[in-house]
Image (cartoon, rainbow, N blue to C red):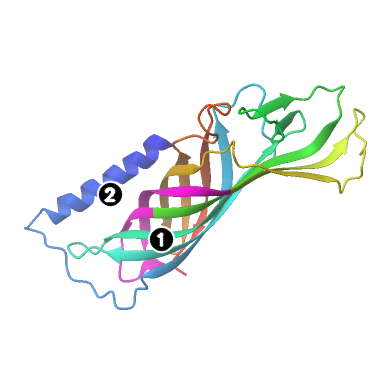
Amino acid sequence: MKKVILSALSILMFGYFVQAQNPTTPAPKLDLTGRASDHLMLQFGGDFLTGTPDSVKTSGFSRHFNVYFMYDKPFKKNQHYSVAFGAGIGTSNIFFDNTTYANLKTSGNTLLFTRVDSASNRFAKQKLTTIYLHAPVELRYFSNPEHPGKSWKLAAGLKIGTLLKGYSKAKDYQNLRGSSIYGKTYIEKIENKRFFNATDITLTGRVGYGIFSVDMGYLVNGYLRDGYGAVMNKVSVGLTISGL
């Protein structure tokens, strides 16, 4: 995933500089008066952890939901290309099956993922949630920059974030026979963000048509803080709605 995004960014940059440096084919002046500079970008999709140890077993649909406000600035020399930057909130929910328990209550400096055997009480469901304040930046290409809603688009860049909140949420504590001990509505929620990486550095890429695109992301610097647990990275794939 990281190589795919870096390749897309390299292609975008190479295409722009080749066209910008070619005096025999000057880019025509386009009418962008009807093109909005400010965009709301919504993203929803799946999250996947890589490099997980045997004690970590994910389950279900781990997912993200991001909301960003972006400012799009076309280049003067070639208006097919633009740079976009902005800010917003990114959330991620990683779900685990009932044989894995992430213990955020521990007083140590290592996040313990405990494997729960079949003879032990357990939670039916658990998830880890992180919420970041993000500053995304993209290099974009539009096949039809005068009408973005009718244009193929390609974008690559990165987003840098700072951790606002991290917590675990487990539901329905069961005995070894699978019966609820406190009732199915019982929820254990533990807020503790010190195990998660305080800074999010994610390579991003998108390809699509009109306001819809498929987005990809690769977390470069790790899901957990260095020395606080297993070295795991996160890969994201989803749908983006932008240009609203």
Estimate how packed mark 1 is, as few (under 14), some (14 to 19) or many (20 or more) residues with alpha carbons within 10 Å. Answer: some
Q: Overall secondary structure of the magenta stretch?
A: strand
Q: Earlier in the sequence, mark 2 or mark 1?
A: 2
Of tags 2 and 1, the one toward the viewer is: 1
Estimate the x, y position of residue 26 in percent, counting from the top left. 11, 62
- Evaluate if marks 2 and 1 touch, with contact meaning CB atoms under 8 Å apart: no
Q: Residue furthest front?
A: 107
Residue 78: x, y in percent? 20, 62
- Give above or below for 29 relative to 140: below
Q: What residue range appears in magenta?
A: 137-164
Which residue in the structure is indicated by mark 1?
A: 86
Q: Is residue 168 left or right of residue 203?
A: right
Image coords of residue 237 (percent x, y):
52, 45
What amino acid is found at the position of numbered circle 2 in the picture? Leu
How far from the left and from the top, in percent, is residue 244? 47, 70
Is 79 left or right of 234, judged from the image as shown? Answer: left
- Whether residue 144 appears in this view of the structure is no
Residue that carries the numbered disc 2 in the rendered image: 12
Say few, some or many: other residues with alpha carbon within 10 Å of mark 2 (under 14 / 14 to 19 / 20 or more). some
Cα separation, mark 2 vs mark 1, equals 20 Å
In the depicted structure, whether residue 63 falls above or below residue 99: below
Q: Visible in this render: residue 31?
A: yes
Which residue shows up at 7% across the image and 57% down it?
Answer: 23
The residue depicted at 34 percent of the width and 40 percent of the height is 6
Looking at the image, the residue that sits furthest to the left is: 24
